[in-house]
Amino acid sequence: MLLLGRMARKAATAASADQSKNGPFSAETPKPAQRFSLLRRRGNWKDALRRRFLAGADLLAVLAGAGALALVQDPLPALAAIGLLPLWIVLAKLHGLYDRDHARIRHPTLDELSSLFHWVTLSVGLTALALALAPDLSMTPLGAAALWSTVLAAALVLRSGARTLWRRVVPPDAGLVIGDGPLALAVRRKLELARGHHVELVDAAQLSSNGSAANGHSANGSMANGHSTSGRPAHAAALEQLIQSRGISRVVLAENDLDERTLATVVSACRSQGARLSVAPPLQAMLGTAVNLNHLAELPLVEFRTWDPSRSTMLIKRAIDLTGSLLALFAVAPVMAVVAIAIKLDSRGPALFFQVRAGREGVPFRMLKFRTMVADAEERLHELVSFEDLPEPSFKLRSDPRVTRVGRFLRRFSLDELPQLFNVIRGDMSLVGPRPEEVDLVQRYSEPERFRLSVRPGLTGPMQVHGRAELTFSERLAVEREYIENYSLRKDIKILGETVAAVVSRQGAF
């Protein structure tokens, strides 16, 4: 990231300076920007439509807040607050709430929770101040609280719905991954597993040492192996032509050996064609996940997170675990009763069972689950898999013959995990954390892999929202390492929210 900070600045200069020279950076005169039209779907109409959807969601959220204000107070302040709607939208624009999706490949609504909090708080404060100028319109503290809480909650729900609706009515962006190595493969894999990014990979390309481009795609548009199938043109215009001919609107540069010359080529081509560019850092192994990029004056500095979360943070996490588990148990108690009856009617054996799993620091604990397999499943395990013969300390059988009919349904919607709320109350588990693994498998962990045992295992976790059982063991460790090394309460709340979408989609559930 430190190198990228310097390289990006030099690349922009190099790209423009080399336009007049012959060689790998020479390119044709950039085409004029396409005239914008939302109705005719020309120009940057997709992002314009998304901004309008989000603004509409915010307008509805403010109207809902005004309705709540009218219920707890006289309707006149609510009507006056509606008259200040333009102020709310301008403040949202100043907070960047309509423009961040454009730059990022994936921008979930939960990622902007802090920005929404600041926007709503500032807007309510200014609205209250404006209404206080007219004594008959002043908001009471209860009215202000109703307006604030309703707008914040409604904005989260409506913005999420607006993005979902936008993805349904707008075709996905055509994506191009540039690179031919482990980093490019990892990017393609993440784009396949991740949800909500609205990018469809239609081509692959690689740049030769002199900056020339080669594309590789199959006839039906699916990803090929990235090797040249049509020769290697000798200048950056080839990459521009590839972007233009395939209608590429999102480019991801994932070169393991990235230099300024290559970066300048890609920056120039993307700028010429109006394609958005994302760069995967080539120094992942050195940087790891616990890093932040900050600046000392103009000098970029990579700062590593090498400290544990504070005691107060962990106390709040435990309080959230207890409160959330108790509330969830009250809410799902009828569901759990129905599930227990269905299990008993479907197959012989108890509805609940205990399984020994490895907890924090590898200490075993008895994890409670709804039974999804036949009663003698543990005895039959050796018939299906041998832990000693596994290439890595992890396994998941896609079509396990021991799973019952009801069990298959429970697993699909993760209902079999509900009894673990009692484990959370006991302190064996947390609401969010790495999923607990069987003790026999944990004993096969190498020393670097034992990092996932440094925290309490979770009812849900990063694995559950980033692919679940579709993840390989190394991919699972990667997302869990990022969670542990960059832990925050905000990350827990985000994972809890994303778990709902993961369960509904049933991705990777079997």
Image (spheres, rainbow, N blue to C red):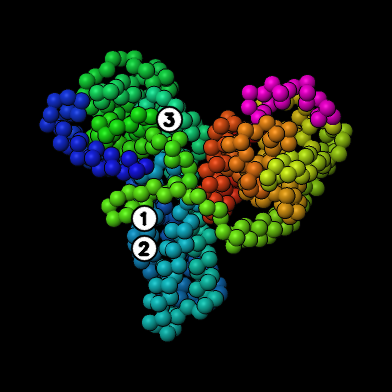
Residue type for callout 3:
Leu
Any part of residue 245 in sight: no
Residue 72 vs residue 509, the one in the foreground: 509
Residue position marked by numbered label 3 in the rendering: 183
Residue 55 position by quadrant: bottom left
Q: Is residue 377 magenta?
A: yes
Dot 1 or dot 3, earlier in sequence: 1
Residues rendered magenta in the picture: 376-397
Q: Residue at x 79, y 32 (%)?
A: 373
10 Å neighbourhood of mark 2: few (<14), some, or many (≥20)? some
> Mark 2 and mark 1 in contact (Cβ < 8 Å)?
no
Question: Front-most of 164 and 307?
Answer: 307
Using the rendered view, name the quadrant where residue 411 is placed.
top right
For residue 76, side relative to residue 462 (left or right): left
- Quarter containing the C terminus: top right
Secondary structure found at label 3:
helix
* Residue 146 picture location, percent across and down: 53, 70
Contact check, label 3 and label 2, Cβ < 8 Å: no
Please rate how many residues cluster around mark 3, counting C-alpha atoms within 10 Å: few if below 14, some from 14 to 19, many from 20: many
Q: Which mark is residue 91?
A: 2
Q: Helix, strand or loop at disc 1?
A: loop
Mark nearer the N terminus (3 vs 2): 2
Q: Is residue 306 visible?
A: yes
